[in-house]
């Protein structure tokens, strides 16, 4: 009854198109075909606010009736972040997709949560500036492959709100860092409807607690991000893209870690295994045939002289680790073609799914010195599993991913053990259960092993202080009984 009252009140306050209970809307906001975890429950309604003030009105109503709230922007996460285990109202920022202000002279930009990072960069590219965090390309929504020629495609892109919620990173992280490094300030609507702003607009500040850091990576469990001021970077003078193959994954990982340890300022260094390269060839989207071997992809950026020197330094390390000759492209159009193999990797795997099969996509990260060990062991486990799976990742900062296709009815337990073994090993190596995907529903069980009960207790205390009724994205990071 309380949820029905909340829906009526939101409808009355915000207007006829502000909230939906349509079955298709509910499914889209509670289920994802590319998520590693889904549940048998959907939100009861989906609200579509147009402003920070309308988000605050929704929060006040939900707080009044003790109705759960689930933030939703791009919907591209893979750990069940926008699932609704306790029902409630999904709050979709579809109508909040504006660039509010652009300050090229200050190298920052103010955006609403549903701005996509790709559209943002396209809009501002003439200024000579760009936003460097790149979590992924558009995904194939409603991925259902009945045969090799049939794909139902809609475009879903990572949006700024979700990128902040998960502290995402991407291929550029080895040079530019993660989302937390590019946030100047945030406008937040708290669970009770209060509106706060975390800072003013300087690029640095020592004033008080770091509220940016508190809300970034909190996965929507502490409040709604309704506006963000982001730092921008200058577009590099010169760029290059390079590719090299290796006999084994260990050889490739060794080369990547040596490059980073020697301080060679690569823009990105990415690893793809032989299975992934085979998939890319089968999809044929890149316009060329690739060697089906463990492969490293590199980005170079900087001055003309600097890029040349960095390429030669990388070439030597590749050679010292049994790699092929480093293929380098400096023409920007051809660079895009070369790099497209890396950017198409995950979605190429998803598009190989047979009808009815599921996908498990997960990530871990470890200190650089342990990366070759974990990559080698995890690759062997993946092969022993006997299912269709691949490895890829941002090895320049110790982060990599596994994607496994499987029959959920008969093979889930096998896949779960393989993934969980990899996660436990990563934590034992002083790593993390997730480098960039986040906890969501899927990785709550690893939190105590990774951070310890003391840290978990502090996190619970923060949660309780801001959200005492446990209304914001409940079921993510912590379970209710733990609060």
Image (cartoon, rainbow, N blue to C red):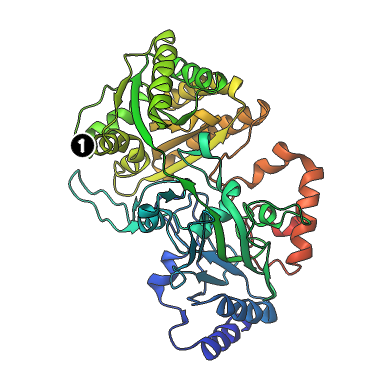
Q: Is residue 224 left or right of residue 96?
A: right
Is residue 187 shown left or right of residue 401? right
Vertical side of 76 occupied by 56: above or below: below
Q: Position of residue 236 (x, y in %)?
A: 41, 39
Q: Residues within 10 Å of mark 1 (few under 14, many from 20)?
A: some
Kindly identify which residue carries mark 1: 284
Residue located 44% across and 23% down the image: 384
Kindly identify the residue that appears in the image at 29 percent across and 38 percent down.
336
Give the image location of residue 228, x and y in percent.
Answer: 56, 62
Q: Which residue is more in the foreground, 115 or 231?
A: 231
Looking at the figure, which quarter contains the N terminus? Answer: bottom right
Q: Quadrant of residue 16?
A: bottom left
Q: Evaluate whether residue 416 shows in this view.
A: no
Residue at 57% across, 39% down: 435
Q: Quadrant of the C terminus?
A: bottom right
Q: Where residue 113 sits in the image (x, y, percent)?
A: 50, 64
């Amino acid at each position: 009854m309380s949820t029905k009252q909340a829906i009526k009140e939101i409808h009355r306050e915000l207007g006829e198109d502000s909230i939906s209970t349509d079955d298709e809307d509910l499914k889209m906001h509670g289920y994802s075909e590319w998520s590693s975890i889904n549940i048998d429950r959907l939100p009861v309604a989906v609200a579509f606010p147009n402003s920070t003030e309308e988000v605050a009105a929704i929060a006040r109503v939900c707080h009044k009736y003790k109705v759960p709230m689930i933030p939703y922007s791009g919907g591209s996460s893979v750990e069940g972040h926008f699932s609704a285990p306790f029902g409630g109202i999904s709050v979709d920022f579809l109508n909040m997709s504006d660039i509010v202000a652009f300050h090229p002279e200050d190298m920052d930009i103010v955006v609403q949560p549903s701005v996509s990072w790709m559209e943002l960069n396209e809009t501002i590219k003439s200024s000579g500036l760009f936003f460097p965090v790149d979590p992924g390309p558009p995904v194939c929504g409603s991925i259902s492959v009945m045969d090799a020629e049939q794909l139902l495609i809609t475009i879903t892109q990572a949006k700024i709100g979700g990128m902040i919620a998960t502290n995402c990173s991407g291929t550029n992280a080895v040079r530019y860092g993660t989302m937390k490094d590019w946030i100047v300030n945030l406008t937040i609507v708290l669970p009770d409807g209060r509106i706060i702003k975390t800072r003013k607009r300087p690029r640095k500040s020592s004033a008080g607690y770091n509220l940016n850091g508190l809300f970034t990576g909190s996965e929507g469990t502490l409040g709604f991000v309704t506006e963000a001021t982001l730092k921008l970077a200058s577009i590099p003078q010169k760029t290059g893209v390079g590719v090299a193959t290796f006999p084994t994954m260990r050889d490739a990982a060794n080369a990547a870690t040596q490059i980073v340890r020697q301080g060679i300022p690569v823009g990105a260094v990415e690893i793809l295994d032989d299975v992934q390269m085979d998939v890319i060839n089968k999809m044929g989207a890149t316009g060329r045939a690739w060697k089906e071997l463990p492969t490293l992809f590199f980005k170079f950026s900087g001055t003309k002289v600097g890029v040349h020197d960095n390429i030669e330094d990388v070439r030597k390390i590749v050679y010292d680790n049994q790699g092929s000759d480093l293929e380098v492209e400096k023409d920007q159009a051809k660079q895009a073609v070369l790099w497209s193999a890396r950017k198409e990797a995950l979605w190429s795997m998803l598009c190989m799914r047979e009808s009815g099969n599921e996908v498990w996509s997960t990530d871990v990260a470890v200190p650089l010195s342990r990366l070759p060990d974990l990559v080698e062991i995890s690759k062997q486990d993946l092969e022993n599993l006997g299912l269709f799976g691949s490895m890829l990742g941002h090895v320049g900062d110790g982060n990599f991913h596994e994607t496994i296709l499987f029959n959920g009815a008969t093979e889930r337990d096998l896949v779960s053990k393989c993934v969980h073994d990899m996660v436990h090993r990563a934590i034992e190596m002083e790593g993390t259960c997730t480098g960039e995907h986040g906890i969501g529903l899927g990785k709550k069980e690893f939190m105590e092993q990774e951070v310890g009960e003391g840290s978990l207790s502090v996190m619970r205390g923060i949660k309780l202080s801001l959200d005492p009724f446990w209304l914001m994205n409940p079921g993510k990071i912590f379970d209710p009984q733990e609060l």
